[in-house]
Amino acid sequence: MKSGLNSKTFDKLSVIAGGIMNPSVQDWKSKGGKVMGYTCSFVPEELIIAAGMLPFRIRGDDNANTANADIYFSSASTCSFVRNCFENIVSGRYNFLDCIAVARTCDVASVIADNLHLSGSKLPVFLLMLPHVSGEDAAQYYKGQLLKFKKALEAESGIEITEDRLRAAVKLCNETRLLQQQLTELLKLPEPPISGSDWSAVLIAGQSMPKEVYNSLLRQLLSCYDPVKPSSAVVPPKRLMLSGACGDDNLVSKIVENLGYVLAYNFTCFGAQCIAGQVDDRGDLLEALARYRLVDHPYCDVLIGSAEKRKAAIDAAVREYAIDGVIGQHLGCCDATAAGMLILREDLKEAGVPCLIFKRDYVSDCSGQITTRIQAFCETLTEGGSK
Amino acid sequence: MTIKDEFDNLKAEASKAMYQQSLAAVPEMAAQNRPFVFSVDTQLFPEISVAAGLTVDSLILLGGFGVYGPQPQINAKIDKVTEFGIDSRACNAIRMAQYNVISGILPVPDALILTNSACDGMNALSRLAETYKPWSKVPKFIVNTPYGTDDEDFIYLGGQFKKLAAFLENVAGKKTDSQHLLDICSESNKQLQLMLELQELKRAKPMPLDVNMLNLAWALKCWISPIKPSLYPWITGWLERVLQAGENAYRAGSGRYDVNEKIRYLWYDAQPVWSSELFPRLEKEFGAVCVSNYYATFYDILLDLSSDDSIFTSAAKKYVLATPMIRQSLHSADLYCQDLLNSVSDYKCDAVLLGHVGHRSQNAMIQLARETSRRNNIPFECIGQENFDDRYMSPDVVFDRIATFFEVVGLA
């Protein structure tokens, strides 16, 4: 943790982001609360909160052994991130979950429920169908799917999701987004008071604990911010952006920082993609939740028809965060991000922004190879002079 | 004319129609058939474009199957794709199609139809076509294929098909005669009826016709007709003749003229482009006959011509539930496993073989399929081949694996 922010508060958030089960979840469960795991940022946390449950985003970890998952998902052809998550579920690391919501994000994730049942799991699993196209028509369809999800949540929790409850949940999550955006703003500074990997940890913590508690911690974190004077003695380090697959494992962020560069923006679905803007809390809330993801901020790599908005978001980030180069990663068996990276490469080429695109595996240790590639890439940035 | 001659002639006619659609022929075809449309999937209510007389070519089929020629040529293309920087582990049909789009070897179309089905790879292909800069001004229509199979899903997709029809009218520059569309839909239903009858012959033991005749039936109706709408009546005639030849063979009772059938297997997958190096050898050495595969399986979902709305909604239902690959990739594992059981039961299969490494859904459902087969005492083997690159697992290795499997389960 760099100086400038409240380190004790950060430590609390870091502990929550560091493992799957965490003190905050333990506390919630000890009070009889239910926890719903969810697999994708398209699953609206707002609905789960309105149903009185704690939303917990299922993520991978450094467990490289996916032997159990590989029985169900062929390792030669299915995404290592999904397999890692599945492994953690079947091996009991998510035993605190009462139910799971799986978004139909990709072909492999869509089978999680069936494979869980085959494995003997009795966990209730809801499959949320989501459009793979952005735009108004798709948002209307998605609204219909959210209505089904809402009914399923009511049945599971025994709590009616009233308009008031949902509105309160939307406001709560909007506050979270606002605080996270304020934190992100700090990364614009020449010498940010928080590193990119610590920023990621703060965001991951937000997807792993009750929002009220999280917002309070985030306010504390921000309230102690003390601008650090830029050091005049050194040339500012190169500033990089990360885009592409997952982003919850911090592998690239840490490599970048260990090499002495700044990871100034993380445009992944565990990062800036899921905290953009606000959900409109005034009118039809289900429609607002659908429009937020499919019309206003359609940044996911699975969405056809979203290219212009995605490009605009990346262009803006490059400009505002003074990015010198972009690192794009895709997982070997993720068709969506593989295409996304080809598109990104072309867009950045046109904009004159250097980029490094690579394919990696989520579970195997590829850090040595990636370090070499990032180092070589950053050296070319240095040779090219400062931006 | 002998039954063999009849089948050989029909195969030659179909192959000729198919071969004319090679990748190399596309620029000329596009030049001669303006407006020219590329679609990621030509099965999106193809009767609309056929009725409009538009030429609609398939980006995915040009990628995967439009590389007619010897296998080394396909392998060389796959290498070129990798060198170009498309280094994902996607199905090579998808990778080749992606390459075709972003390498600039295809002519600029007058319109593009994009969709997320049948799989993540097609979704990715659509996104590349959407963002390919030389095509940035090409009018595009994006279909969001729902992953659900409720009535509301079909109504939603049917509504998109209506908009697609209007979009294609704009592309064609003229209104489609509604009676002509009805006639084409009616003809399409007739073709499907013929294919369903043809499919019934798969129940016969021994199998009276080569499964490739069913593959060709699908290819002509579903791929060639959108490219050459003028062939529509000829395709109906071709299907009638194949059915007649199949029925003659069935009546003769001796099964396929060139095989002594001993084992019947379900190739629960798309057929590899190099299957000519594998299937005849299995026939010759084991009497093992492929009875069915994804593209040789047809579903009884006809276009409902009773009203304007019903046409579009039934076209949606047909697309979602009766299109090869979409049925197996887009939907629930329950449907996938039930289809496996139905095929084994209906067509009296002794074993199930599958395993294209590029098929994500299938690889995610592999244990479900294995367990379904085990519980029903069906010998099951997942091979792990690549359907386009025969170097990933050579036909010899695949043959050995299947031979061992047949021996171990007591079929050979």
Image: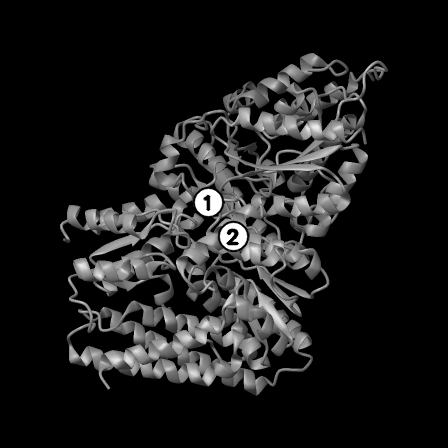
Host chain of mark 1: A
Residue placed most toward the observer, A123 or B133: B133
Q: Answer left or right for B290 relative to A284.
A: left
Q: Residue at x 65, y 49 (%)?
A: A290
Residue A231 falls in image quadrant: top right
> Under tag 1, what secondary structure?
loop
**Front disc: 1 or 2:** 2
Find the distance from the CA under tag 1 to the CA under tag 2: 19 Å
Whether residue B19 can be seen here: yes
Q: Residue at x 45, y 85 (%)?
A: B233
In the rendered structure, which amino acid carries the disc numbered 2? Arg
Whether residue A301 can be seen here: no
Residue placed most toward the observer, B259 or A73: B259
Q: Residue at x 52, y 78 (%)?
A: B228
Q: Answer left or right for B29 relative to B73.
A: right
Q: How is the image coloured?
A: one colour
Residue B288 falls in image quadrant: bottom left
**Rendered image: mark on residue A108:** 1
For the residues tagged 1 and 2, is the chain the same? no
Residue B332 on image: x %, y %: 42, 53
Residue B31 falls in image quadrant: bottom right
Name the residue tied to disc 2.
Answer: B95
Host chain of mark 2: B
Residue B166 on image: x %, y %: 65, 74
Residue A59 on image: x %, y %: 53, 31
